[in-house]
Amino acid sequence: MRQPVRIAPSILSADFARLGDEVRAVTAAGADYIHIDVMDGHFVPNLTIGPAVVNALRPHSKCVFDVHLMISPADPMIPAFAEAGADIITVHPEAGPHLHRTLQLVRSLGKKPGISLNPATPIEAIAHVVEDVDLVLVMTVNPGFGGQSFIMSQIEKIRRLRTLIDATAARTGRAIDLEVDGGINADTAPLAIAAGADVLVAGTATFAGGPERYAANIRQLRGAP
C-alpha cells in the first residue's frame, strides 16, 4: 500500500533563535510533517529539545508533529510528549526492555506509534510488532547529529521493509509509513523513494538557502519539477 511521498523537515537544522517562524515557514512551503528530533545526550551523543519546546511550537503549524525519541528509557517521557502535541511518537527497540508495551503506551494516549531502526539494527528486531505501528523509520546515518552522509547499505533495508510493510498492509488493510532519515538530499531522495520510502526526513536540504528557498527545496525532494 504505497502512499504518496511526503516531506518531513527536521527542525534540527532550523534556526533555533526563531524556531516558531521556521516551523511556520516550512509549513507554508508545503511540508507534510514536522520532524522533531529528541536527544538525551545518553542514548545518542547530543542533547536537543524536550516537551516544552514541542508544546510551544504546536500553535505554529497544523502539520503532523512527527516526534522521534532518541532517548532511553523512553517510556517515562512519552506521556509528556503526547500531551505537548506530538501526533506520531517513534521509539528505538534498544531504548527499553519491552518494545510492545511501549507501543501500546503510545497508542493508549491516542497517538500513532513508530519504530526506528539504527543502521546496525536488523529488521528482525521489529518483525513481531510491525502490525502494531503506524510508521517505521530507517536511519540512514547514525543518530545524534545532522549533516551526516547517507549510508548506502541501508537501501537494501528499505527495500526489505517495503516488502514487509506491504505484506502487513495486505493482511490488516492499514497503511504504515516507511520513513527515511539521514543524509537526504536531491541526490539521495530518489534512491530512497525508489527503494520504497514514502516519507523523507530532511534537515539541511530543506532549510538550505533560507525561507525563500524552502518551497523549492521541498518540491525538489518530493521529485516534483
Image (cartoon, helix red, strand yellow):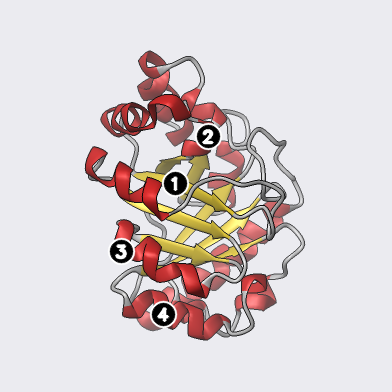
Packing grade of label 3 (10 A; few <14, some 14-19, many >=20) is some
**Sequence-wise, which precedes: disc 1 or disc 3?**
1
Which is in the foreground here, disc 1 or disc 3? Answer: 3
Which is in the foreground here, disc 4 or disc 2? Answer: 4
**Sequence-wise, which precedes: disc 4 or disc 1?**
1
Q: Amino acid at mark 1?
A: His
Asked if marks 1 and 2 touch (Cβ < 8 Å), the reply is yes
Asked if marks 3 and 4 touch (Cβ < 8 Å), the reply is no
Q: Amino acid at mark 2?
A: Gly
Asked if marks 4 and 2 touch (Cβ < 8 Å), the reply is no
**Sequence-wise, which precedes: disc 3 or disc 4?**
3
Residue matched to label 2: 203
Residue matched to label 4: 105
- The residue shown at (25%, 38%) is 60
Q: Amino acid at mark 3?
A: Glu
- The residue shown at (58%, 47%) is 181
Residue 79 is situated, as x and y percent measured from the top left of the image, at: 38, 70
**Sequence-wise, which precedes: disc 2 or disc 3?**
3
Packing grade of label 2 (10 A; few <14, some 14-19, many >=20) is many
Classify residue 177 as left or right of residue 58. right
Residue 108 is situated, as x and y percent measured from the top left of the image, at: 33, 80
- The residue shown at (31%, 44%) is 56
Residue matched to label 3: 83
Which is in the foreground here, disc 2 or disc 3? Answer: 3
**Sequence-wise, which precedes: disc 4 or disc 2?**
4
Q: Helix, strand, or loop for circle 1? A: strand
Residue matched to label 1: 35
